[in-house]
Amino acid sequence: MDKPTATPIVRGQIINKDASPIIGATVIVEGTTTGTVSDANGFFELDLSLFTKKGVTLMLHYIGKETKSVDLKIIDLPKSLGQIKLKDALLK
């Protein structure tokens, strides 16, 4: 009997340098319009079942913070990324 295939979902919490949640940070699959935003506690969840490639890159962004990229292998999902810290952007 085959094991049922789990839905390829990625979860995580986006925080700042003080470990406070970042509300409304965007999480987008690079090169697409598929994404989500973090909730009032900085948490996000994204279903990647529409992607057939072996891997994708998530781009995490918030105004005034450096954009962070996270590479994922679809085969390793579902997965929790835990806390992801976004650093303050360097002003030029």
Image (cartoon, rainbow, N blue to C red):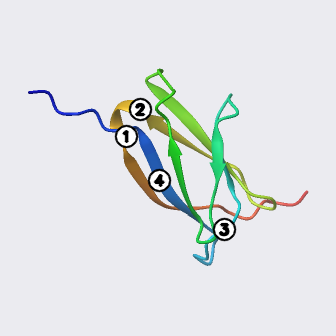
Q: Which mark is residue 11?
A: 4
Tell me if 8 is positioned left or right of 37 in this view. Answer: left
Marks 2 and 1, how far apart in space? 6 Å
Q: Is residue 57 above or below residue 20?
A: above
- Residue in the picture at 60% in, 66% down: 42
* Mark 3 neighbour density, 10 Å: few (under 14) some (14–19) many (20 or more): many
Q: Label 1's element?
A: loop
- Amino acid type for the residue under numbered disc 3: Ile
- Amino acid type for the residue under numbered disc 1: Leu
Specify whether residue 28 is in view.
no
- Where, quadrant-wise, is the C terminus in this rendering? bottom right
Q: Position of residue 60 (x, y in %)?
A: 65, 50
**Does the CB distance between marks 2 and 1 fall below 8 Å?**
yes
Q: Which mark is residue 7?
A: none
Tell me if 56 is positioned left or right of 86 in this view. Answer: left
**Does the CB distance between marks 1 and 3 fall below 8 Å?**
no
**Which residue in the protein does label 3 denote?**
22
- Amino acid type for the residue under numbered disc 2: Ile
Q: Label 2's element?
A: helix
Tell me if 74 is positioned left or right of 5 in this view. Answer: right
Task: Name the image quarter holding residue 54.
Answer: top left
Upstream in sequence: badge 1 or badge 3: 3
Q: Label 3's element?
A: loop
Q: Position of residue 29 (x, y in %)?
A: 61, 36
* Mark 1 neighbour density, 10 Å: few (under 14) some (14–19) many (20 or more): some
* Front residue of 75 and 6: 6
Marks 1 and 3, how far apart in space? 24 Å
Upstream in sequence: badge 1 or badge 4: 4
**Which residue in the protein does label 1 denote?**
77
Q: Label 4's element?
A: strand
